[in-house]
Amino acid sequence: MTAATDTLNPTQGDHAGEAHGHDDHGHHAATGWRRWVYATNHKDIGTLYLWFSFSMFILGGTMALGIRAELFTPGLQFWQPEFFNQLTTLHGIIMVFGAIMPAFTGLANWMLPLMLGAPDMAFARMNNWSFWLLPPSALLLVISLFVPGGAAAGGWTLYPPLSLQFGMGMDLAIFSVHLLGLSSIMGSINIIVTILNMRSPGMTLMKMPMFAWTSLVTAYLLIAVAPVLAGAVTMLLTDRHFGTHFFKAVGGGDPVLFQHIFWFFGHPEVYIMALPAFGIVSQIIPTFARKPLFGYHSMVYATASIAILSFMVWAHHMFSVGMPATAQLFFMFMTMLIAVPTGVKVFNWIATMWQGAMSFETPMLFAVGFVCLFTVGGFSGLVLSIAPVDTQMHDTYYVVAHFHYVLVAGALFSLFGAVYYWLPKWTGYMYSEKMGKFHFWWSMVWFNVTFFPMHFLGLAGMPRRIPDYPLQFTDFNALASVGAFCFGLGQLFFLYNVIHTIRGGVGKAPANPWEGAHTLEWEVPSPAPHHTWETPPSQELVEKGLKEQAL
Amino acid sequence: MRFQRALGLAALLPACTFAIDGKYTFQTPQTLIARDISDLHAWIMAVIVVIFVAVFGVMFYSIFKHRKASGHKARHFHENTSVEVLWTLIPAVILVVMAWPAAKVVLAQKDTRDAEVTIKATGYQWFWGYDYLDYGFGYKSKLATPREQIENYKGQGAAKDTHYLLEVTEPLVVPIGTKVRMLTTANDVIHSWGVPAFGVKQDAIPGFIRDTWFKAEKVGTFRGQCVELCGRDHGFMPIVVQVVSKDDFKVWVDKKQKEAKAAADDPNKVWKLDEMIARGKTVYDANCAACHKADGAGGGPFPALAGSKIANGPMAAHLGIVLHGKGAMPAWQGLSDTEIAAVITYERNSFGNKMGDMLQPKDVKAARK
């Protein structure tokens, strides 16, 4: 037992907290709105994060549909070009910072203490803060649409000098990014301290679940790069209002400097959105293959190598700004190198499936879908890593296709998988397998209809972020727009399914609904009571699970 | 009648083939570098397809064969060091095979030495300016597609031409088989100059000069678009390059040089009010009417000039806004002193504005300092 759990749990008892409800606990839990506003319980905060993230997903998705509606046919139909640019910008910022990142933090909040055998996150009250910074920052972004001059319209990358031209919408976006950065740093500190200090007896770092590993590495990445982003946008702010010239050539500044700083944050950010997904998939596939994860150790090393490499490749986003040939070569080689650890991960997942006894419940479908589509995204990433080929693809729809394969099929699909996987634990009810499978196949088909044609558009040279396009791009754009609307519609089925489950689903869920799941969260009842692991799980219990996972 | 229609369709065919070129994959390469890039891409795709088939083959085999539903029992292996080392090393080797040819192309692409013609492309919000540095002339190249074709609001809008959004008032003209070095820079924000058929794409960064090069191998017209988000009309600044024979190029250069000489405004000329207004109208229609509308009524975030405080206020403030921009309005320093003087004079004496004053080019020159 670690020192921290010792102090937190002065009394020993039998393993889970399930025996006594929270009323025995000596204090009254808040109810009504107070329960959520003052929340310090990791499960409540996890729930808040997840709902926040879903509402942002719907908001950002609606904006995406606005974009696709305009692009359905050539010509300007619905929006003025300025507003189109605001849509693309807010769609990007909201999906990255509002939807995907909070969703992973929410999952970490909900699941890490359960999986590690800890009673709560290390800093429960800071946890409340880190969540409640999110709604105001989302509000700033939404308000920015209605201020004079409209929202920021420089793309989510906010490149100056363009971003120096906008009105106060840009300042609101900058403040919003500041808040989001603060929130992620606090969330990360919490995750790191919880993982390092609050694991149950017998669970060494090299024996903890992969999801904990990827969350840990992700949290370190965030602490390293969130301040970099904050610095970059602060410099923007002072350039805009206080007469500095960081990015203005007129005063001796360099517009490309911003791109270097931004991508020094931005590339690790890509992995901040991908690594937790790797962790989730590494939990789901062994469960439904009824086999331990193949190559746990190499998975950990691959995760760490990807994280480290992610700091050395930022300039591959900038192959067309005009770097010296040597720099171009360095960043090209480093970028290609990322394919090695990523490949190791994919091979490990496949080796986990190999000779398994697989069944395909919805979480597994999403996990396998993730592996397939993420691999495609990895391949297009490899193509883009080749600097001369990138000359043709840079800032075209090929890039749009690539990162949506990585982020929608990667991050989002893994998140759906995670929701279905843990939904019985959260709600105490089983979701409808029929609806879940429908959601998967529907999303899978329309996702590909939406984004696969974009590869061709990019090859043919259609620039991204244009509200109108030459005629040869018409067919694929129409196809992509149809796909996008159907894909969007499918997510309402998901919402319906989740609500249906919360209201009772297809029946009560057992503590462990999955035959092949052996991590600690399945040892507490479903739904997980308000307080769990008030006393840490016994070493025997931990070791029993670890043995099943071959750790 | 039917015969005529068939003839008309046949005439459209070449246009169709052009449209199809660059629909599914790269535009047909017209330079050595573009061909190298295309070959590299084909090579990488071949490698990827092989890996794809191998990886997905194994995965789908196990998905179909190793199902619980078909009674397959899980075998509990979970580690195999030699396999893991192998599948780390093999991809590394594959990467080397991909990196080697790619590195050669990078070096060739970056080698802008020994160019025979040097042209500077300047990105403006939202058009391109080309300066032929060796021949001492330059011109602006703007979107030629009329607004009626672009704006389809409420279902209105004219039919679109074949080269919709890919046509310009005046293309860049370059000689065939000649190493052309393109310098890129920008006046306001970052733009990016690229022609896919030539395999070139180079950001144009304000305050800095970057370069790239190409050597076109075929006479013809090649088209690209600005590829870096540069504000409202990012989608409306095409790049059209016309490759001509060396002789034709000489003739063209000669003609342009003479034109440039004839058109050059004498900066010391003192203009009369009505001359200035007439000149100003052409400048206004070419540069300002897109946002402030031809009748000065403005639209969206762009204020009306008719009766505006700026156009009816002090001259210096008016000049300051045109020179330095404000909010969504870009700085117009790319216009000549005469053009700026003319357009301001026009704005103060049109749309019902009756200031009756005027600006001379030398005043603008003084204000620039």
Image: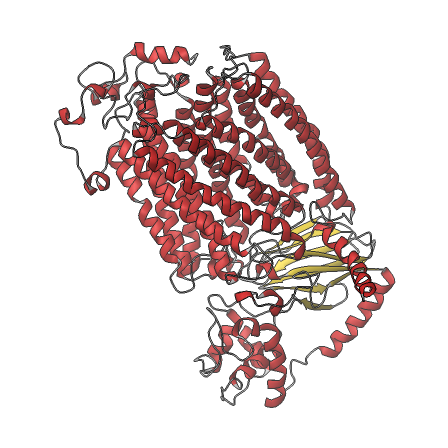
In the picture, measured across the screen, residue A208 lies left or right of residue B108, that is: left
**Residue A304's spot in the image, x, y percent?**
48, 26
In the rendered image, the residue lying farthest to the right is B247
Query: Taking the image as drawn, is residue A102 in sight?
Result: no
Image vertical order of residue B198 relative to residue A346, above or below: below
Query: Taking the image as drawn, is residue A479 in sight?
Result: yes
**Residue A53's spot in the image, x, y percent?**
37, 41
**Residue A322's spot in the image, x, y percent?**
63, 48
In the picture, measured across the screen, residue A407 lies left or right of residue B225, that is: left
Closer to us: B160 or A181: B160
Residue at the spot 28% in from the left edge and 31% down from the top edge: A43
Residue at the spot 40% in from the left edge and 52% down from the top edge: A174
Image vertical order of residue A238 relative to residue B85, above or below: below
* On-image quarter of the C terminus of chain A: top left
* On-image quarter of the N terminus of chain A: top left
In the rendered image, the residue lying farthest to the front is B2
**Residue B350's spot in the image, x, y percent?**
53, 85
Colour theme: secondary structure
Image vertical order of residue A67 relative to residue A385, above or below: below
In the picture, measured across the screen, residue A27 lies left or right of residue A326, that is: left
Query: Dividing the picture into quarters, in which one does residue A549 lie?
Result: top left
Q: How many marks?
A: 0
In the picture, measured across the screen, residue B226 lies left or right of residue B67, that is: right
